[in-house]
Amino acid sequence: MRDPSSRKAGGLPNRRLKTPKEWPSDTKIDPGRWVFWLPEGWKQAKRTQEESGKVLTCYFNEENKRFWHKRDIEKFLGYELEERPAKEEKAEDDDTTTKKYVTDDDVFPRWPGDWLPRDWRLGFRELPSGLHRIHVPPNQEEGFCYHRAGVLEYIQTGRKLSSFGTSLPAEEKWGHVEIKKRKHKRDGWPGRQYKFAKADDYLEVKTFRVLKLPLSEEEENNLWMETLADFQEIQEQLRERGFEDPTFLLTTLTNSKQSKEPVPGQKIVERMCSLWYCRPDDFCEKQCYQRVFLKEEQIGSKKDLICSDTHIFWSPQYNCWKIGRLNEDMAGYLRCDDPAQFPWETKKDWKVVEAHLCVP
């Protein structure tokens, strides 16, 4: 078994990794997702300043020497580190679709890295949202693993695989395929009825947009949200808490001043019309954005800043941008099936989940 410290950077962190004793007392192992370009054997850390409480990301090499920036690491190593692959531009006269199927001759999965044993096999599973890479153990024809975490758990514990027949482990069918009532383990009380959303359970909202701040004059004049008065105060409160100026997004309804047509899932959509700030950590190797707002009922001159558990994030499992809980296994309130690098670059319409599927 490999040393946890030699993990592939950019993947899921090893939460059992301990902070070295040689590190300063104000610096701990980063429990979040590590940057993809960090060299093998290096460690990512968080340093918390005692006076201000500001949290900074730093990096240590195998000799526990600290570095603060990628450019300093490149200077120390003498070569440039990996960059994100450039986004391929599609020709204007190219009408071909980019969606692939398992029957296509040119579909080949790339080997994910050193964490996958060489005697395993790779393939694709065709999901409603697109292709998803799968990992098949040696001498195994009954099941597979979707993700790296499942592969490692299978190697260590022999957990049940996702079946080729159902695409889900046998003990998890109740939570994804069927709707059942679970009984309370102790008294036999009936539990809640689980609801599941599919791609077909979403309705297009042609007037919903994700915009990057600051806005152009044309965008400001065409918004459902009349004012951004809270934006400056939210920025100031984040600075006071030690955050650098991040990218801010605005989700809003456009063209609603001219159109009187009802918006599908209007209550859900209007609730998601808000301000979002870019979190310092990535999710699934893309930036994610957390909803922020000021508490409405507040005694005193300064309102409290509220950070919601709702995020805008990229879901590689379903190949779409989601607005909802930061969990790939949970359906988002809204989704956009556009693989753009950033949510404000999406060209396809956003879709809202049907109201009867939302948790009350």
Image (tube, grey):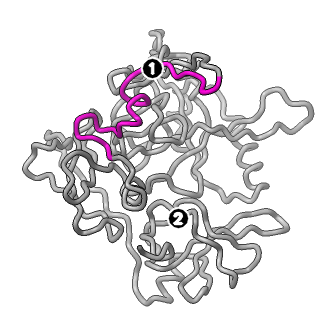
Which numbered circle lies on residue 355?
A: none
Q: Position of residue 239 (x, y in %)?
A: 74, 55
Q: Is residue 258 visible?
A: no
Q: Amino acid at mark 2?
A: Asn
Q: Residue at x 20, y 44 (%)?
A: 98
Q: Position of residue 271 (x, y in %)?
A: 60, 24
> Splitting the image into 4 quarters, where does residue 300 fall?
top right
Question: Which is more toward the observer, 145 or 278?
Answer: 145
Which residue is the extreme one toward the right?
300
Q: Residue at x 48, y 60 (%)?
A: 12
Q: How many numbered circles are shown?
A: 2
Q: Which residue, given by chain and number where applicable, does mark 2 sit on?
A: 14
* In this rendering, position of residue 310 left or right of residue 53: left
> Splitting the image into 4 quarters, where does residue 158 fall?
bottom left
Local SS, label 2: loop
What distance separates the C-alpha of mark 1 from that of mark 2? 34 Å
Q: Residue at x 31, y 43 (%)?
A: 162
Which residue is the extreme one toward the left?
105
Q: Is residue 97 visible?
A: yes
Question: Which is more toward the observer, 195 or 64?
Answer: 195
Mark 2 packing: few (<14 Cα in 10 Å), some, or many (20+)? Answer: some
User: Which residues lie in the magenta part?
Assistant: 161-186
Q: Position of residue 129 (x, y in %)?
A: 29, 36
Q: Is residue 279 above or below residue 330?
A: below
Q: Which residue, given by chain and number where applicable, does mark 1 sit on?
A: 180
Q: Amino acid at mark 1?
A: Lys
Quadrant of the drawing holding the N terminus: bottom left
Q: Is residue 191 above or below residue 240?
A: above
> Splitting the image into 4 quarters, where does residue 215 fall?
top right
